[in-house]
Image (tube, rainbow, N blue to C red):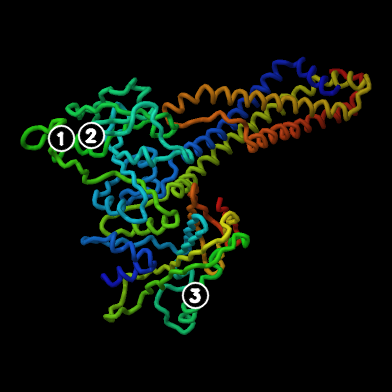
């Protein structure tokens, strides 16, 4: 009864009601969006690498090493010598290693020099291994394996020729044109930076740089051609950017980490990816919380807008209330009516906000994935989200009780003789 | 110099095992970041094996970082060393996991003013850390769901605690725990 009265009363003031709902909807969409992005970003980062016990690079900072080795963000301060890498890789407690050599690019995508161990041991999102949609791992020096996004964005297929540029620019003047690579494999999408990486054999990185040793001038004698580079030159790299380590036993992880951090021949740093990631969240957490607080205040502003709309309407509706009283409504009915009205506005605002948020996420997901590698899974509302939204409706009801109280007082004193 | 390298590396028997394979001719020395009030707990878990390695500045363990000068300081050092070697009360775990202490590895820190065999004072060791590695074997590892860092009860003036956790499918760091805070192991 009261519910339908509230609905009809709102219907009578359609435009104000709709605007109020819209204000709440926008604020709720913002709050929910921030919440969703925050969890998606965390999951995306946490899912990028798994099963790697240690990442070893030149001694810098934990976060720096994690960001450049796994997320391809930023650059290495220095490299790791091949001798040190070999020494650690051969240690009896080490099960496997994945060497990583960064620094070149191909049409805006990072080139990563590695070995076939990368395809064997690299895992993401728990236990998922890299899968080839087409082709196979490296077999020859100038083979290249593409991430899913690279293949899609550049339209490459198996057998396509790829020219690697020196440096990281989108358009680089130092192209290694004399040594073209051939696509032998394309990886399935992973939702991690692997998708945007061009993988080449470690030795190929050395080979394409043979010409660049010393200055940018070729070495004395003939230029090293593609075939000669393969046959005549020792292509063992002198250094690599970083490497990932899998231990035989997790129990030895900290011991190995300390041994590497105290290694006296070269300043190296070993990090545990999950631990470094926790530190990253501690850092990002401040900005995160700030965003949530801002979004919370925007919701509060939306609810205050609703309160203003109901309060200002009270005077116009004195006659409506008086008529309701004359047909037998008690003051408490008037109170309930107004609270119900506020509840309806808040609830529809929340529903519209959820719809708006999902609509926006759905529209923005492909863009975010392409440009930032951030995968936004369209998951349902978590219990935390639901609790948050419920709290907004309850807050709306509470806010509605103020105008309801005033209307209640008015109806006690106003008679039908009221002149508006 | 080589004497100190060896003494430091022998802090842990396993480290000492690593030392010959991981060191070559040219060497440099880098000093650990030493932060008073900061305690680290490295917890590794695999199968029924639980390894807890803790390190804390001597200031937090005995209240000073120089060689003991007074009787009271000597007693504090002796009782701390005895406690560490007993291996009791380092962590608390669910009794249902039925964990038994298996081994303790610990070597006392080099405290400044300490005279080595040649009678030379070690000035570099102005800061000293206690570090111990305690291994447990648990009969029912499935019940091993949490851990309490009881070692904090033995330490004084702790301002920051970092608990690094490694287990199959899990890598995490927790901070700010107290001795009674349960750190989930799952």
Q: Residues within 10 Å of mark 2 (few under 14, many from 20)?
A: many
Q: Is residue A244 above or below residue A298?
A: below
Give B101 or B117, whichever is nearer the viewer: B101
Q: Quadrant of the N terminus of chain A?
A: top right
Mark nearer the viewer, 3 or 1: 1
Mark nearer the viewer, 3 or 2: 2
Labelled pair 3, 2 in contact (Cβ < 8 Å)? no
State whether residue B160 appears in this view.
no
- Residue A141: assigned label: 2
Real-space Cα distance between discs 3 and 1? 63 Å
**Which callout, 2 or 1, points at the residue further toward the start of the chain?**
2
- Residue A334: assigned label: none
Q: Is residue A11 above or below residue A65?
A: above
Task: Please determine if labels 3 and 2 lie on a single subunit.
Answer: no
Q: Residue at x 47, y 60 (%)?
A: B40
Quarter occupied by residue A25: top right
Using the image, name the chain to which the residue with label 1 belongs: A
Q: Which residue is disc 3 drawn over?
A: B80
Left-right relation of A223 to B40: left
Labelled pair 2, 1 in contact (Cβ < 8 Å)? yes
Left-right relation of A90 to A418: left
Q: Residue at x 32, y 79 (%)?
A: B115
Q: Position of residue A139 (x, y in %)?
A: 27, 33
Using the image, name the chain to which the residue with label 2 belongs: A
Task: Please determine if labels 3 and 1 lie on a single subunit.
Answer: no
Left-right relation of A180 to B99: left
Q: Which residue is disc 1 drawn over?
A: A229
Q: Position of residue A289 (x, y in %)?
A: 55, 41
Q: Is residue A251 above or below residue A181?
A: below
């Amino acid at each position: 009864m009261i519910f339908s009265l509230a609905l009809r009363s709102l219907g009578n003031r359609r435009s104000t009601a709709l605007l109020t709902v819209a204000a709440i909807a926008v604020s709720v969409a913002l709050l929910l969006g921030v919440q969703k992005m925050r969890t998606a970003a965390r999951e995306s980062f946490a899912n990028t690498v798994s099963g790697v016990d240690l990442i070893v690079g030149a001694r810098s900072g934990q976060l720096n090493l994690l960001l450049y080795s796994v997320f391809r963000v930023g650059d290495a301060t220095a490299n790791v010598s091949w001798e040190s890498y070999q020494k650690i890789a051969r240690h009896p407690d080490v099960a496997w290693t994945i060497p990583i050599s960064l620094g070149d690019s191909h049409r805006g995508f990072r080139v990563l020099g590695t070995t076939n161990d990368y395809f064997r041991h690299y895992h993401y999102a728990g236990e998922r291994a890299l899968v080839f949609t087409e082709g196979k791992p490296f077999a020859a020096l100038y083979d290249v394996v593409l991430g899913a996004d690279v293949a899609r964005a550049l339209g490459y297929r198996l057998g396509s020729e790829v020219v690697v540029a020196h440096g990281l620019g989108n358009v680089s003047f130092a192209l290694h044109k004399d040594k073209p690579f051939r696509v032998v494999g394309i990886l399935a999408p992973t939702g991690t930076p692997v998708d945007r990486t061009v993988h080449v054999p470690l030795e190929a990185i050395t080979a394409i740089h043979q010409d660049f040793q010393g200055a940018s001038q070729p070495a004395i004698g003939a230029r090293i051609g593609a075939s000669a580079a393969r046959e005549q030159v020792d292509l063992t790299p002198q250094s690599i950017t970083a490497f990932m380590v899998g231990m035989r036993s997790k129990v030895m992880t900290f011991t190995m980490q300390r041994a590497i951090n105290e290694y006296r021949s070269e300043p190296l740093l070993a990090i545990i990816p999950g631990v470094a990631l926790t530190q990253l969240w501690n850092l990002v957490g401040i900005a995160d919380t700030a965003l949530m607080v801002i979004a919370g205040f925007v919701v509060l502003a939306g609810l205050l807008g609703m309160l203003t709309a109901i309060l200002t309407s009270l005077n116009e509706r004195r006659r409506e209330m008086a008529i309701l009283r004359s047909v037998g409504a008690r003051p408490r009915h008037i109170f309930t009516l107004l609270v119900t009205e506020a509840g309806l506005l808040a609830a529809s605002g929340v529903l519209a906000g959820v719809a708006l948020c999902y609509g926006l996420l759905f529209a923005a997901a492909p863009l975010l994935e392409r440009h930032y590698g951030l995968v936004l899974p369209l998951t349902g509302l978590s219990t935390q989200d639901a609790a948050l939204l419920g709290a907004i409706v309850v807050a709306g009801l509470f806010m509605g009780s103020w105008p309801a109280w005033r209307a209640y007082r008015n109806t006690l004193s106003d008679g039908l003789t009221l002149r508006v | 110099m080589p004497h100190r390298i060896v003494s430091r590396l022998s802090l842990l028997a396993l480290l000492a095992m690593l030392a010959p394979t991981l060191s070559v001719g040219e060497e440099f020395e880098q000093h650990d970041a030493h932060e008073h009030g900061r305690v680290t707990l490295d917890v590794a878990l695999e199968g029924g094996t639980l390894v807890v390695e803790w390190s804390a500045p001597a200031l937090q363990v005995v209240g000073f970082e120089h060689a003991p000068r007074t009787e009271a300081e000597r007693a504090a050092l002796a009782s701390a060393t005895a406690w560490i070697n007993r291996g009791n009360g380092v962590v608390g775990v669910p009794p249902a996991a039925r964990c038994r202490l298996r081994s303790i590895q610990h070597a006392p820190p080099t405290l400044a003013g300490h005279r080595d065999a040649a009678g030379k004072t070690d000035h570099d060791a102005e800061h000293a850390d206690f570090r111990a590695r305690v291994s447990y074997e648990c009969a029912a590892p499935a019940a091993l769901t949490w851990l309490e860092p009881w070692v904090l009860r033995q330490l004084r003036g702790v301002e920051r605690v970092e608990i690094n956790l490694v287990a199959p499918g899990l890598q995490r760091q927790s901070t700010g725990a107290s001795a009674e805070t349960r750190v989930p192991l799952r």
